[in-house]
Amino acid sequence: MKHSTGEDRRIIRTKSALNRAFLELVKEKGYESVTIEEITSRANIGRTTFYLHYQDKEDLLLEGLEEQLTTLVNEIIQRPLALWFQENNGKLIKWIFQTLFEAVKENSDIFRLITREQSNKVYDRFRKIITNATLKILNENPWIQKKRNNVAVPISYLTDYFSGAMWSSIVWWAANDFTPSADEMADSFRLLFFPGMLRALNVKDVSGLLEPLDSAAL
């Protein structure tokens, strides 16, 4: 069902109010101490309305990151990976990493606060978002489907390792006031993570991940 423009504006106002209240409360009390009741009271919005949009405060916190990552994954899986690498001069992997870092930077105030507390609930939700997105990409890669049994480590371990490494990088980045840039963080993360991933997948370089392009893909 499509929302009218008026409904869309009300949703935007509601979410903006909830986000403002959430950030204020986290600054005042710390992430773990903030309750849904306090968020809705500060935003002057009913609890029922909150639950129309979010499951919990982790959902509120990571909504922007999940939306951007979902858009990114949907763009990637629409065409063969080989075409993406060809069009991006082999920089698809860095582009994925950079998108994640940029999404965090856009919400730097809240990430700066929550990474100080190291909430297990936040990390668990972050891990789930990253894992689901990664598995969706892997499941759309014909090479992975054909060679899955030859992968040196379980795919689930690979995705968990990736999400843990990404989260640790975000914690470090926040502690350093989000410097260097998202672009530089993506370069560094790719340098550290990507060679090990290729070895785990039993390929020498990125070309080993790709299926040859046929005329229909172009």
Image (tube, helix red, strand yellow):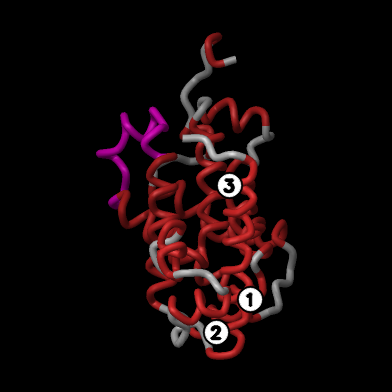
Type of amino acid at the residue the image marks with label 1: Ala
Dot 1 or dot 3: first in sequence order is 3
Q: CA distance from mark 1 to mark 2?
A: 9 Å
The reply to whether discs 1 and 2 touch (Cβ–Cβ < 8 Å) is yes
Q: Nearer the viewer, residue 198 or 58?
A: 58
Q: CA distance from mark 3 to mark 2?
A: 37 Å
On the image, the x and y values in percent for residue 62 come to 51, 63
Span highlighted in magenta in the image: 138-154
Q: Which residue is mark 2?
A: 116
Question: Quarter of the image containing the C terminus?
Answer: top right
Q: Residue at x 63, y 45 (%)?
A: 6
Type of amino acid at the residue the image marks with label 2: Arg
On the image, the x and y values in percent for residue 44 come to 56, 74
Q: Nearer the viewer, residue 105 or 153?
A: 105
Q: CA distance from mark 1 to mark 3?
A: 36 Å
Q: Residue at x 68, y 62 (%)?
A: 106
Q: Which residue is mark 1?
A: 174
Magenta stretch holds residue 153: yes
Total number of numbered labels? 3
Dot 1 or dot 2: first in sequence order is 2
User: Residue placed farthest to the top in the image?
Assistant: 215
Magenta stretch holds residue 185: no
Q: Residue at x 56, y 83 (%)?
A: 26
The reply to whether discs 1 and 3 touch (Cβ–Cβ < 8 Å) is no
Question: Against 101, is 154 above or below?
Answer: above
Within 10 angstroms of label 3, few (less than 14), some, or many (20 or more) residues?
few
Q: Which residue is mark 3?
A: 7
